[in-house]
Image (cartoon, coloured by chain):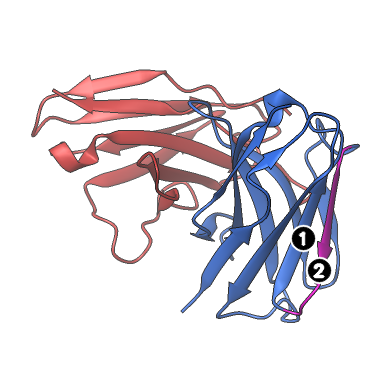
Amino acid sequence: QITLKESGPMLVKPTQTLTLTCTFSGFSLNTSGVGVAWIRQPPGKALEWLTVIYWDDDKRYSPSLKTRLAVTKGPSKNQVTLTMNNMDPVDTATYYCATPGRALDFDYWGQGSLVTVSS
Amino acid sequence: QSALTQPASVSGSPGQSITISCTGSSSDVGGYDLVSWYQYHPGKAPKVIIYESRKWPSGVSNRFSGSRSGNTASLTISGLKAEDEAYYYCCSYAGSSTWVFGGGTKVTVL
């Protein structure tokens, strides 16, 4: 059974750096072809793909946010960390981690972590 | 990489069929037969209901069907039920391990 769960601060101040962790089970990020993606959804707005990291440490970023994003494996072998710098109120959103399936859809999702950016 | 275009809302009566369009470009929808559709109920995680433009994940009702032609993909919900009232998002693979989502469509069952 595959599960994912996001964790991190619920509130960050403008200009601060956000760090979120995705803790997963039921699969290994050491397995060929496996990846973990991050997707966000501002309140009342659309989903937005942010980044993906693969088993071989290949990383891809949304062109519009690539200068602010970083994704890494760890700190544990079943975790992936997302950092986003220079947070702004427009970055207020629910942040999800999800797995890209073989069909390049997102077949498993975490419950989401609501992050509010406010002073 | 611009968001895919979906109608903001679609409505139908129980038992009817509705279709949601998803328009992109040759860089995403038109370039890859890899459109997925997600059903989203607020407060819950999105759930994939169509992948590879027209295939159903296990456990998903075949009342949901997908198609793709050129730069436009479509989701049809047949035999509309009250439980289908939700938001629906399309998503297309856009090459080089990147994806783009649509703006979302609110489906209302009258």
Label at residue A81: 1
Q: Which residue in the structure is indicated by mark 2?
A: A73
Amino acid residing under circle 2: Lys
- Residue A12 forms part of the magenta stretch: no
> From where the camera sits, is residue B54 visible?
yes
Describe residue B106's horizontal placement relative to residue A6 as left or right.
left
| The C terminus of chain A lies in quadrant | top right
Q: Residue furthest right?
A: A67
Q: Which chain is drawn using blue?
A: A
The amino acid on which the numbered mark 1 sits, given as a three-letter code, is Thr
Chain identifier, colour red: B
* Label 2 element class: strand
Q: Which residues are magenta?
A: A68-77
Q: How busy is the neighbourhood of tag 2: few (under 14 within 10 Å), some, or many (20 plus)?
A: some
Looking at the image, residue B11 sits to the left or right of residue B43; the answer is: left
Crowd class of label 1 (few under 14; some 14 to 19; many from 20; radius 10 Å): many
Residue plotted at (46% across, 28% down): B104
Q: Residue at x 87, y 38 (%)?
A: A68
Tell me where residue A104 appears, x and y as whole percent: 60, 56
Near-viewer residue (B74 or B48): B48
Q: Secondary structure at mark 1?
A: strand
